[in-house]
Amino acid sequence: MTSIYRTTGACVALLTLIWACEAPQGEVEEAVDPRAAVWAQSVELTPAGPWAEGDQRGNGNTQGPGTWMRCAFHMGKPGAKVYELSHPRSMSMPQSPFSPPLEYVYRPTVGIPYTAHAFNGEHLTGGEPGAQGTQMDALGHFAYLPEPWLGEGDLPADSAMYYGGHTQADVKPTPDSPLLKLGIEHAPPLVTSAVLLDARAQMGGGDPLQPGQVITAADIDAMLAAQGLAERGILPGDVVYIYTGWSDNWNQPPYYAMGPGLGYDAAQMLGEKGVVLVALDNPFTDPANDGQLMGQAGPPEGTPEGLPFVIHHHNLTQSGVHNIQNANLAELAADQVWESCTIILPLRSVGASGSPVRPIAIG
């Protein structure tokens, strides 16, 4: 019964919004600002943490009538269009050095005897689809140890801890087991509002951000203000897209060697605000200095000791916030679509640590 009332409340708010948008001018002046009305009503309908013990969805628990309401508002705006936020997938795209590259075999056209049918197909002979191209991390993708491993002997994986207090025995009890907890199949469909922050414009003066450049909490506040989003802010259940311009290097050798990224205090702030997912047009979400991946340079200043990929650590093991790597945000930024409806549907691959995704934005 509670869910019925919650859904009904969302519908009433939407009908009120439609009336405000279509009423004569004199009546509109007396009506509540439709965007502010949607924001306020949606927050009331959006669940807030902390989540139950043993939770496997993290801030995916925010998804529901509140986020759908905000999404519907943007979908219904005159002139709204669909934006593809992923890169085309192929063997020629840049591929992560942390995972095996994708290898496809394209089979000949075949038929069925005594029929008029002919059909085509292909298959993978290698690679990790959930870690290449535009992809989304499961919460079980990252764990943490009680203290840094010095690289001597075997990794003490049995002591690893995961989001929600899950242990290695809970999540991956044997080396060859899938994720028994926190796999990507537990991520819900994301149907929500998105905010795009243009770091390239605000921090780079129109140029792509530099390798190792860190986007701080103060930078996020400054971008919200510069883009007219300070009143709205970041709402529970939002997706936050951050355009750095690093995607200019897509299909260029430097792309996967380094890059700008999110700062630790920014990740903490976004987690506290209840965002469900963060996506940048960069390879790691985390910033990476030139030479860092080869051991020739340390991580950016402010990175906690022993956690060079602290954004992965914090989002996936502490806050329950998903990451998307390699988002394609240039067109959305060029059109200055700062707010949109976004839909992100990871594959329900049981026990997988990630999934290829095709996120879209409508706005």
Image (cartoon, helix red, strand yellow):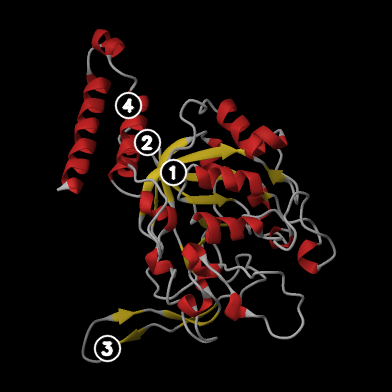
Q: Quadrant of residue 39?
A: top left
Q: Which residue is mark 3?
A: 112
Kind of residue at badge 1: Asp
Kind of residue at badge 4: Ala
Does 29 appear above or below 72? above
Q: Which residue is mark 4?
A: 37
Residue 78 in view:
no
Q: First in sequence: mark 1 or mark 2?
A: 2
> Which residue is at 41% across, 62% downward?
346
Q: In the shown orientation, is residue 119 left or right of residue 232?
A: left
Where the C terminus falls, by quadrant?
top left
Q: Which residue is mark 2?
A: 80
Q: First in sequence: mark 4 or mark 1?
A: 4
CB under 8 Å between callouts 1 and 2? no
Q: In the shown orientation, is residue 273 left or right of residue 39?
A: right
Label 2, label 4: how far apart the Cα atoms are: 20 Å
Label 3, label 4: how far apart the Cα atoms are: 59 Å
Q: Position of residue 84 (x, y in %)?
A: 46, 50
Kind of residue at badge 2: Ala
Label 4, label 1: how far apart the Cα atoms are: 16 Å
Kind of residue at badge 3: Ile
Numbered circle sitting on residue 32: none
Q: Quadrant of residue 83?
A: top left
Q: First in sequence: mark 3 or mark 4?
A: 4
Q: In the shown orientation, is residue 54 left or right of residue 111?
A: right
Mark 2: which secondary structure? loop
Q: Which residue is mark 1?
A: 238
Instruction: Bin the neighbour count of mark 4 within 10 Å (Cα to Cα): few under 14, some 14-19, many 20 and up.
Output: some
Instruction: Bin the neighbour count of mark 2 within 10 Å (Cα to Cα): few under 14, some 14-19, many 20 and up.
Output: some
Does 255 appear above or below 362? below
Q: First in sequence: mark 1 or mark 3?
A: 3
CB under 8 Å between callouts 2 and 3? no
